[in-house]
Image: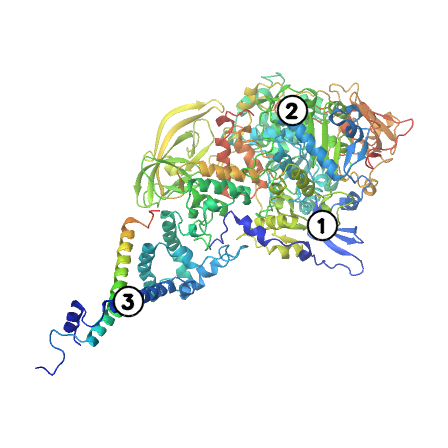
């Protein structure tokens, strides 16, 4: 087979040949019912791929893509995103900033008073501020590195656009890690030689076939698999259906270890094992103790594949560190689980093929590395890592991991980095002694304590003196903790620019807000199936950009125009040319393996399917040949004891997994006397983080008294005179918020939940102001999980609740800014 | 008239024909001859003539029509003789004599079927590549000239490469092989991007005692006939050539290995998990192939390491003189593949032994073939904080 | 006295013209072509020994 060769100057030919414009790519509608007027288009989103009917220039109907066997209820919220009253309509500038620029009264940030400006003015201001920051300060003062879930679509991936454009102007502070798996992705390379959390896992068919016991440890896949990184088709659910049947037939035992009766537990009809919040490591240590003392552990596996078990055993037996033996009795006190139950579980795990599946919430707490590390140690002791249906996974609840990968290549994206050879206008690479990259969750620390040196992952980070932030594709006023601390920090920033399509709290606290359009207002391309890479999807534009919103591509081309780099930024190509190129690149990568039609045909048909992949077992290659397929740990083996971490000398993350008491913990732990309730702020059931909260009609299907629901136990409600549907005030020393009570016995006493992503709507800009909608991060603490990961500790949070009496303030989280004329 | 009498006439001075007639006549005859000669010669230098042979018309001529030398936005076309017939007169004549081989081929049908053509494609291509290499792509320069190039009109990527090429007055074909016809399938299983790297970086001649770098993962053998497998060389691994035997090279691979297990994995240096390659079980345990030296305990893991030298055989190809072009490719691929969702970490953000863990965890997100993966990981490790003074 | 106008040492105009044409139109062109061909052949052989032309 000969290679049809293009040299790497193919850009010349491609750009001259690909000058096709819109009209020639008119979509022939996939004819649905002839009765419904309008045309059908196909597109996708994090909630799923779908078809939409557009009539009169508006989206009037959304129905799931036919390849999606288990569409999520959240598709009903799509229209509400496009037509939300919170749409950013025009470029807006904070009123006081418009008058006084970087000398504005920053204590007014959050008062939500903005003045409308033209696009030219807004972009000029943006450019001038970038200029000022680079010349007056330096690259260390600009933070444009924050990232988030953005919208789907590889071409218009907004963070790529923003960072490419800003990078062509000057250098800036970047981040490492993320809020999803900050602790997990930092510890697991030391233990299992890979970040693990974003890697494909053992295929569901193999788990269903081989596992006899599945432990869902703080894991709610039925809730979390509704959304995905790419355009979801929810293939995992057919396996969850099968699992449900197997549980009913008694073929597989599933235990959900969780303080809450989760959506998954109820769906599968499986066992729930209650555990006191934040005490999981203690229980795991006790299980390990049982395995070891009852000689149920796989010594041969430990000898062949692991390093350091012999240095961990003394800790287990109470001979080192705290000198406390980690017996089930010891754990029972802490965990609220009977000792005999712990023993029984340990024996059950060792008796047959056991699959451990961890969720991510458990590592979003103080010492978040420990539960993951200990989970790996348990799996190692069971000796089933690398066997189908055995071992440990940290990601089966995410983006269709566990559905076999087709093996196809997905499309590339609009480049995030400037092209090779491009030098920024301000080529200054001197960060003045500050670190160029900071742990993602420590940016507020940087603003409040510039110059502070912190420990991070074996090194030291000097937090930079931030003066300006550019925010795109993420919502820091949702994902970060401790709102009042953030309010304090934001008073130190001179300029904040946010690009978004809906007026989030991040927009509210910014100085310049630029209206981007939603993904449904532009053409794009993405894959569907997420980790299964099941196919490629044409994301056809549904409607034109609303109001004065623009694609990020357009916005940043115009920004670059101001310093003469718009041609280099866009490579002189328009939207359809880029799409064509990304598609052709994908087609090339799949040549010989998966046939893909010409671009025009693909765009017209709407998708290309690659078929199902083959089942695969995680870590099997390592188990088969630990020498040649060594893990990426320093030794190549599973490191139960890590000399490297040991040498860092950290007090809150040592050479092996340990139980550490938390700074605040319910059920008899520190702080529980003043604030007895543990607030869990896990991923929402009916949003993607904070996306879709602004979808009014859809939000009303779950909001209580117009506020975010707080779930609590009947006992806790009774003690406080709270009834289901009441308005309650949730508070601690850090802040206060209003929420709507949902009383349910899914929740144990002392355990309450508010889903994260609830939009922050403070009554006013003052520090300590009551949040009117119910954002849990009003009360969470801004603390690094440990010196190793410096990750978020959102779930180490205690609160008290009281029935709210008094004048009920309106919800201020939605509806956009107050426009000043 | 008989020949002897003819000869006598020719030898003697002219009796009847005047000097003027003779000179003018001879001159005109010369002109006519030269015209006819060149017309005839040039007739064999036309596209029409070339494709009159079916072998050419059905194969390479079709391929040409898919390329930028056939149709482009300036309407300038190159035909067969522009590139394949040397313009220099002496070389042109020599080539015409050489064409007797082609006549021979036509008569005896050496490439008269598609299959025969494909089989010979590599050999034929290599003839041309050698010719272009020797005269620095002189035929290309009949139209293209570095001094006339407007680099600013090129894409960023092209500018970097082209400016560099212009500085060195590099032969066009070094990089632009396959510009007019399809490439021979000599790099089966290697991705296109990697194939480009290989073409640009691979040397064709070797010197003993010199060190070269593998461009991609390459098989190694126990014997000069390359029959008994001994393992695999990782990408960008330095090897020293000890002996050259036709198409095979005897090379020395130096490194360190852990003593736990079979000792198959060879790492670049003590305590560094930077893979130089691996040996088969048999080769790893063979004293004739692997010599062991001092042993040390690695403090970071408590495991023992041994310094070794392995002497193996490999095919004389896919080796570069330096890592420069390999790292260029790796850097560029890393920056574009690994910045789709987030800004890619700086190379020196992690140390060499941390990179494998980070890299492994991200592979689900990228479409990289095995060779590219190997080369990028090694690039990251070799530019990690262990090897960089850059403050981070 | 000879009846033949041509003696052994005498050449006619016709003969000379014929000879002239033979040389100029036939022999020399042919020899030239052969010479050039031979030159080309020699250069080709040298190229086989010394490699393709690269003296630019």
Chain of the residue where label 3 is placed in the rendered structure: B
Question: Which quadrant of the figure has residue B39?
Answer: bottom left
Can you identify the residue that label 3 sits on? Answer: B24
In the image, farthest residue toward the left: C1
- Cβ atoms at labels 2 and 1 below 8 Å apart: no
Chain of the residue displaying label 2: A
Q: Quadrant of the C terminus of chain B?
A: top right
> Front-most of A716 and A162?
A162
Q: Secondary structure at mark 3?
A: helix
Quadrant containing the N terminus of chain B in the rendered view: bottom left
Q: Position of residue A610 (x, y in %)?
A: 60, 52
Please tell me which of labels 2 and 1 falls first in the chain.
Answer: 2
Residue A137 shows which numbered tag? Answer: 2
Q: Does residue A410 appear in the picture of this structure?
A: yes
Q: Residue A60: image x %, image y %?
A: 80, 51
Q: CA distance from mark 2 to mark 1?
A: 41 Å
| Circles 1 and 3: CB atoms closer than 8 Å | no
Q: Nearer the viewer, mark 3 or mark 2?
A: 3
């Amino acid at each position: 087979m000969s290679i049809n060769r293009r040299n790497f100057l193919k850009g010349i030919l491609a750009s001259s040949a690909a000058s096709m414009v819109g009209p020639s790519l008119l979509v022939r509608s996939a004819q649905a019912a002839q009765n419904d007027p309008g045309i059908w288009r196909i597109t996708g989103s994090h909630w799923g791929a779908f078809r939409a009917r557009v009539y009169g220039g508006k989206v009037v109907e959304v129905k799931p893509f036919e390849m999606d066997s288990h569409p999520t209820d959240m598709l009903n919220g799509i229209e509400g995103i496009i037509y939300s009253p919170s749409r950013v309509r025009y470029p807006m500038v904070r009123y006081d900033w418009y008058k006084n620029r970087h000398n504005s009264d920053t204590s007014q940030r959050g008062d939500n008073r903005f003045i409308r400006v033209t696009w030219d003015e807004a972009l000029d201001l943006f450019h001038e501020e970038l200029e000022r920051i680079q010349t007056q300060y330096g690259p260390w003062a600009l933070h444009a590195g924050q990232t988030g879930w953005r919208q789907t679509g590889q071409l218009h991936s907004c963070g790529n656009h923003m960072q490419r454009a800003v990078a062509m102007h000057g250098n800036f502070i970047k981040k490492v890690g993320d809020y999803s798996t900050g602790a997990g992705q930092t510890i697991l390379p030391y233990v299992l030689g890979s970040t693990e959390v974003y890697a494909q896992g053992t295929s569901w068919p193999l788990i269903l076939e081989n596992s006899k016991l599945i432990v869902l440890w703080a894991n709610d896949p039925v809730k979390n698999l509704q959304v995905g990184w790419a355009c979801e088709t929810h293939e995992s659910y057919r396996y969850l259906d099968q699992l449900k049947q197997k549980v009913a037939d008694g073929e597989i035992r599933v235990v959900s270890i969780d303080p809450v009766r989760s959506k998954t537990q109820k769906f599968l009809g499986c066992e729930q094992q209650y555990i006191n919040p934040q005490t999981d490591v203690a229980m795991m240590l006790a299980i390990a103790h049982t395995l070891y003392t009852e000689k149920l552990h796989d010594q041969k596996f430990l000898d062949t594949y692991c390093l350091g078990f012999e240095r961990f055993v003394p800790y287990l037996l109470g001979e080192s560190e705290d000198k406390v033996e980690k017996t089930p009795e010891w754990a029972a006190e802490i965990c609220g689980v009977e000792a005999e139950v712990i023993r029984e579980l340990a024996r059950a795990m060792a008796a047959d093929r056991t699959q451990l599946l961890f969720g991510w919430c458990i590592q979003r707490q103080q010492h978040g590395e420990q539960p993951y590390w200990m989970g790996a140690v348990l799996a190692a002791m069971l000796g089933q890592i690398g066997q189908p249906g055995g071992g440990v996974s940290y990601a089966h609840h995410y983006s269709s991991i566990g559905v076999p990968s087709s093996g196809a290549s997905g499309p590339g994206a609009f480049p995030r980095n400037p092209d090779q050879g491009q030098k920024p206008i301000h080529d200054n690479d001197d960060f003045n002694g500050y670190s160029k990259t900071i742990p993602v969750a420590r940016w507020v620390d940087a603003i409040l304590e510039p110059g502070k040196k912190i420990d991070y992952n074996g090194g030291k980070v000097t937090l930079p003196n931030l003066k300006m932030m550019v925010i795109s594709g993420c919502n820091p006023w949702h994902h970060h903790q401790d709102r009042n601390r953030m309010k304090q920090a934001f008073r130190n920033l001179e300029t904040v620019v946010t690009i978004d399509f809906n007026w989030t709290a991040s927009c509210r606290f910014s100085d310049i807000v630029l209206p981007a359009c939603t993904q449904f207002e532009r053409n794009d391309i993405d894959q569907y199936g997420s980790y299964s890479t099941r196919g490629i999807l044409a994301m056809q534009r549904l409607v034109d950009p609303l109001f004065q919103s623009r694609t990020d591509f357009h916005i940043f081309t115009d920004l670059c125009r101001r310093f003469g780099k718009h041609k280099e930024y866009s490579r002189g190509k328009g939207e359809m040319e880029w799409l064509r190129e990304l598609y052709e690149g994908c087609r090339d990568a799949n040549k010989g393996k998966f046939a893909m039609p010409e671009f025009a045909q693909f765009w017209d048909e709407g998708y290309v399917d690659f078929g199902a992949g083959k089942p695969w077992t995680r870590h099997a290659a390592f188990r088969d040949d630990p020498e040649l397929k060594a893990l990426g740990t320093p030794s190549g083996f599973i490191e139960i004891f890590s000399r490297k971490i040991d040498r860092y000398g950290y007090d809150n993350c040592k050479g092996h997994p340990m139980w550490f008491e938390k700074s605040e913990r319910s059920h008899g732990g520190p702080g529980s006397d003043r604030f007895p309730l543990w607030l869990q702020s896990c991923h929402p059931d009916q949003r993607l983080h904070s996306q879709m909260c602004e979808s009014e009609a859809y939000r009303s299907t779950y909001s209580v008294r117009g506020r975010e629901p707080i779930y609590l136990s009947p006992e806790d409600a009774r003690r406080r005179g709270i009834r289901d549907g009441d308005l309650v005030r949730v508070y601690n020393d850090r802040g206060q918020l209003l929420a709507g009570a949902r009383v349910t016995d899914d929740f144990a006493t002392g355990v309450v939940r508010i889903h994260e992503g609830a939009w922050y709507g403070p009554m006013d800009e003052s520090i300590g102001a009551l949040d009117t909608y119910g954002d849990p991060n009003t009360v969470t603490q801004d603390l690094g999980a440990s010196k190793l990961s410096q990750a978020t500790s959102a779930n180490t949070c205690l609160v008290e609740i009281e029935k709210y009496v008094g004048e009920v303030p309106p919800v201020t989280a939605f509806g956009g800014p107050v426009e000043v004329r | 008239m008989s020949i002897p009498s003819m000869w006598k006439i020719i030898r003697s001075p002219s009796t009847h024909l005047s000097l003027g007639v003779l000179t003018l006549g001879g001159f005109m005859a010369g002109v006519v001859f030269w015209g006819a000669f060149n017309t005839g010669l040039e007739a064999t230098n036309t596209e029409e003539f070339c494709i009159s042979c079916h072998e050419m018309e059905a194969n390479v001529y079709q391929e040409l029509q898919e390329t930028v030398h056939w149709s482009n936005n300036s309407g300038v076309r190159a035909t067969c003789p522009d590139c394949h017939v040397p313009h220099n007169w002496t070389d042109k004549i020599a080539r015409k004599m050489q064409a007797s081989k082609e006549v021979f081929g036509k008569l005896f049908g050496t490439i008269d079927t598609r299959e025969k053509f494909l089989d010979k494609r590599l050999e034929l291509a290599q003839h041309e590549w050698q010719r272009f290499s020797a005269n620095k792509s002189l035929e290309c320069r009949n139209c293209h000239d570095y001094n006339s190039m407007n680099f600013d009109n090129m894409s960023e990527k092209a500018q970097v490469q082209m400016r560099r090429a212009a500085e060195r007055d590099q032969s066009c074909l070094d990089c632009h092989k396959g510009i007019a016809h399809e490439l021979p399938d000599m790099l089966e299983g290697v991705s296109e991007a990697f194939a480009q790297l290989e073409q640009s970086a691979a040397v064709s001649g070797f010197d003993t005692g010199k060190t070269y770098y593998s461009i991609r993962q390459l098989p190694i053998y126990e014997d000069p006939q390359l029959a008994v497998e001994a393992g695999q060389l990782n990408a960008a691994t330095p090897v020293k050539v000890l002996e050259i035997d036709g198409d095979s090279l005897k090379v020395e691979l130096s490194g360190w290995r852990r003593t736990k297990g079979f000792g198959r994995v060879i790492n670049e240096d003590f305590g560094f998990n930077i893979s130089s390659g691996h040996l088969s079980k048999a080769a790893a345990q063979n004293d004739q192939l692997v010599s062991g030296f001092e042993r040390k305990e690695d403090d970071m893991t408590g495991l023992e390491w041994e310094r070794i030298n392995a002497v193996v055989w490999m095919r004389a190809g896919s080796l570069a003189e330096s890592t420069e072009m390999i790292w260029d490719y790796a850097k560029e691929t890393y920056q574009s593949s690994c910045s789709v969702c987030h800004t890619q970490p700086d190379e020196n953000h992690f140390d060499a032994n941390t990179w494998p863990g980070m890299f492994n965890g991200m592979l689900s997100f990228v479409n990289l073939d095995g060779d590219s993966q190997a080369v990028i990981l090694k690039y990251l490790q070799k530019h990690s904080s262990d090897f960089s003074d850059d403050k981070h | 006295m000879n009846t033949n106008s041509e003696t052994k040492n005498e050449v006619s105009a016709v003969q000379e013209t014929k000879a002239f044409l033979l040389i100029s139109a036939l022999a020399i062109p042919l020899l030239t072509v052969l010479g050039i061909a031979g030159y080309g052949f020699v250069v080709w052989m040298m190229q086989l020994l010394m490699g393709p032309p690269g003296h630019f």
